Image (cartoon, rainbow, N blue to C red):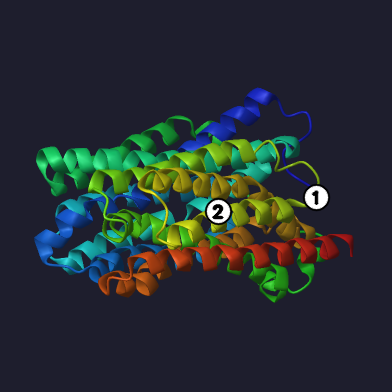
Amino acid sequence: MSAATPAASFRSDATVISLVGFAHGTSHFFHFMIPPLFPWLMAEFGLSFTQVGLTMTAFFLVSSIGQALAGFVVDRFGALRVLVGGISLLSLSGLVLAGAQNFPMLLAAAVVAGIGNSVFHPADFTLLNRRVSVSRLGHAFSVHGLSGNLGWAAAPVLMIAVAGAWGWRASGVAASIVGVAALLFLLANRSLLHDAPLAVAGPKHAKGGTFAFLSVPVVWMCFVFFFFTVMAFGVLQNFAVPVFEQGYGVTLGFAASGLTAYLLGSAAGTGTGGFFATQGDRQERKVAVALAVAALCAVLLATGKAPDWGIVVLMAVMGFGAGFSGPSRDMLVRRAATSTFGDAAYGRIAGFVYSGIDLGLAGAPLVFGPMMDAGQFVQVLWGVAVLQTLAIATALTVGARSRRTGSG
């Protein structure tokens, strides 16, 4: 049962959803703090695609480990305190980037940002699950995902604009200012996000203790599902622009428009998906259909036969499919978690499951960076299609298992 009562007002729900979404958008802004600066950093420090991609591997690997641990901290001390600490570290990472003198210092900036980023999914989803009416959770997850997409979209614009005008180090300072502004806004509204840890009670929680959730197969399947879906995005996040520039022979600006189309399509899909996420109990089918559309677009692009204008169209449709699946995906994970352990352990389960996101993003540069260096640009898109197909299979498995658990 959600801690938010059926009588919770629309205004209360909307306020919590907006504040949590704002925090999530800030974390996603810092996902793109470094990638837009790749051309500057490669020239400054003489780095290859694989090397510069390691900064994002470090970011997401640290975030993945930290996220699994942050869930326990959220359950113990509450989500708001953890969010404040996370945003503070994100702001600090911008200053570390601005002062970087070598490649290890770039890695240090990525690590600090990764630690800060690790808190958001367990804290955000705990707040939404406890403070928002169940009937509005689909829209809450939609806004949460949409705000993340907006954070992704805003970061390249700001980072590239500032780097072009004043240099890449100034971009690090600009990112830090974004973090400080977000922190001040969150603190100014802290009374609206106050949450208290829930007491662990009931037979479902007593059985197996604190780490009992690790023995449940559906929890691991959720983890794997996120790993596949987000690794596919990680490939596009890091390499879509050079893939289209080199693989299709289009200009840098046109290649970048393909990634922009994906992000905008994803935002539109996320917003639309919120209206369908709470309808029925077969969220896995919605996820499967949406990801099948995305995978088909990836296949069409991977053939290398799409016309230049098709890059923008197919990337937009692929983004819409991936985004549409997001709210249903989050509802699916919530059902899988609460059907076995209820609300009190939701932070630790969300932290573990959503750490698959960071692990997938960490793995993308490691797996596909060498392919980029070898000039296998179009083949990278085949990899995206394969990952999306594997995600479909895991989503269907999660849905079937969670229904059996909930009815058992």
Crowdedness of circle 2 by 10 Å Cα count: few (<14), some, many (20+)? many
User: What residue did someone put label 1 on?
Assistant: 281
Crowdedness of circle 1 by 10 Å Cα count: few (<14), some, many (20+)? some
- Judge depth for marks 2 and 1 and give the one in front: 2
Question: Vertically, is 101 above or below 375?
Answer: above
Give the amino acid type for the residue marked by disc 1 in the picture.
Asp
Where in the figure is residue 341, as x and y percent of width and height?
75, 61
Q: Residue at x 57, y 41 (%)?
A: 270
Question: Vertically, is 127 above or below 236?
Answer: above
Where in the figure is residue 142, as x and y percent of width and height?
59, 40
Taking the view exactly as shown, the residue that stands out farthest to the right is: 408
Task: Give the spatial CA distance, label 2 vs label 1.
Answer: 22 Å
Where in the figure is residue 33, as x and y percent of width and height?
29, 50
Determine whether, in the image, residue 371 is placed left or right of residue 44. right
Where in the figure is residue 118, as x and y percent of width and height?
45, 58
Determine whether, in the image, residue 373 is placed left or right of residue 8. left
Question: Vertically, is 176 above or below 386?
Answer: above
Which of the two residues, 101 or 324, is positioned nearer the viewer here?
324
Q: For residue 165, which quarter of the picture?
A: top left
Q: Is residue 101 visible?
A: no
Give the amino acid type for the residue marked by disc 2 in the picture.
Ala
Q: Residue at x 78, y 52 (%)?
A: 282
Element class at badge 1: loop
User: What residue did someone put label 2 on?
Assistant: 294
Q: Is residue 287 visible?
A: yes
Which of the two residues, 58 or 393, is positioned nearer the viewer here?
393
Which of the two residues, 295 or 354, is positioned nearer the viewer here?
295
Q: Indicate the quadrant containing the C terminus: top left, top right, bottom left or bottom right.
A: bottom right
